[in-house]
Amino acid sequence: MVPLNWYLTLGAVVFMIGVFGFLTRRNIIIMFMSVELMLNGVNISLISLSHFLQDLRGQILVFFIITVAAAEAAIGLAIIIALFRNKSTIHVDEMSEMKG
Amino acid sequence: MPSDYLPILMFMMVATAFGMGALILGEIFRIKRSYPEKLMPYESGNPPVGEPRMRFSVKFYIIAMLFVVFDVEAVFLYPWAIVFDKIGFYAFIEMIIFIVILFVGYIYAWKKEAFTWD
Amino acid sequence: MLPKLFFGYYAVVITFLSVLIITRKNPVHSVMWMLLLFFHIAGLYLFLNAEFIAAIQVIVYAGAILVLFLFVVLLLNLREELQVKRFVGSWPAGLIIAAGMLAIVVNVIKSFTAAPRGIYSIEYIKNATHTKALGQVLYTEYLFPFEIASLILLVAIIGAIVLAKRKLRS
């Protein structure tokens, strides 16, 4: 039997790798993939908690998270396309119009 | 239960081993005698012109996005179909509401000519 | 021993693939590593007796969302991406933030105390089959969130078409 802490630690590690990627990559598509990575880290924690506490609510939550992730990917990638059309760059550090 | 999926695991291992084994064996045994003309992409004998990678049209994105959304809808239908006989008419009403709301989006996409390919 | 060995394999591969995803230069390579990552996560879910969730992980994430990512990467076709630098100038700050948060979370996990166990034991799920047990909860107890999910998907359709589609004949 694998202890619960191991699963939670794995979820935390995947989440933090996502945080690192989101904060440091210049390419906005990879930043977006880091967000998906963070969601997956949370999903690992929820499924393992649901298994160990013998409660299905965690899995229902994962179900809705996957639904929201699909909607988020559709909208976010559409925003990236619109951004690329207007600015013809996808590097976040080159977008500085709001800087005073 | 995890042990029920052992055949799938073995299947995936065999498939991976076969695919990688074929590539590795080919890499070991094939004769490597290449020159620039041989490495060029084949375009019926003419020298290739322009970039091989062309930009995709945004129409592909719209279709893929609609696929994602209706894929999620289909995923919601599987457990519904399984528990339908237990919950009964009540479940039928819920799913009708769900599908009607998504049907509004379908009509919107249709009116915006997201399905026409020109 | 065998379960721990399996978990060790999954943990090492998932961590390694996550690092690969955020460090590759070519976005297409990132998407491909992410495909492998999602299959491994689905395997982990099977290991935790969540068969249906593993199936939708493969169907929705690996089958649909990654196709969307791949289309956008090909749509933008970034040739210059292979020459420019990958990280922003202040990447050590990001590393410190992520590492600090990881240290905090791992320390918090140690003091985790379990709540009393629910009624959905492994035997219950085995008798009822996982999809049936999940559907029973989803369509009775979580009816309202389920209807809200359809609204979120509606917003996704309308928003994506408004943002991505060019103006018609103008």
Image (tube, coloured by chain):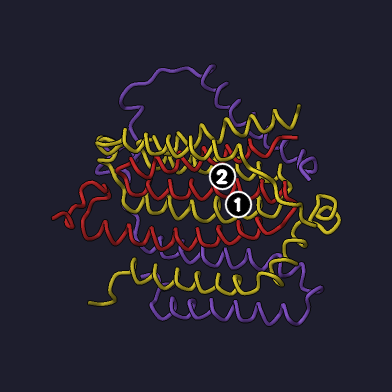
Chain colours: A red, B purple, C yellow
- Point out the image quarter for the N terminus of chain C: top right
Query: Which amino acid, by three-letter code, is at mark 2?
Result: Phe
Position of residue A52 measured from the top left corner of the image (x, y, whole percent):
72, 46
Residue C57: which disc? 1
SS state under label 2: helix
Residue B48 position (above or below residue C50): above
Residue drawn at x 33%, y 49% as measured from the top left: A28
Residue C47 position (above or below residue C163): above
Report the number of numbered marks.
2
Label 1 near label 2: C-beta < 8 Å?
Answer: yes
Residue C38: which disc? 2
Within 10 Å of disc 2 (Cα), the crowding (few <14, some 14-19, many 20+) is many
Residue drawn at x 35%, y 36% as measured from the top left: C25
Query: Which amino acid, by three-letter code, is at mark 1?
Result: Gln
Which subunit holds the residue at mark 2?
C
**Could you say which is closer to the camera, residue A14 or residue B42?**
A14
**Could you say which is closer to the camera, residue C22 or residue A5?**
A5
- Residue B7, quarter of picture: top right
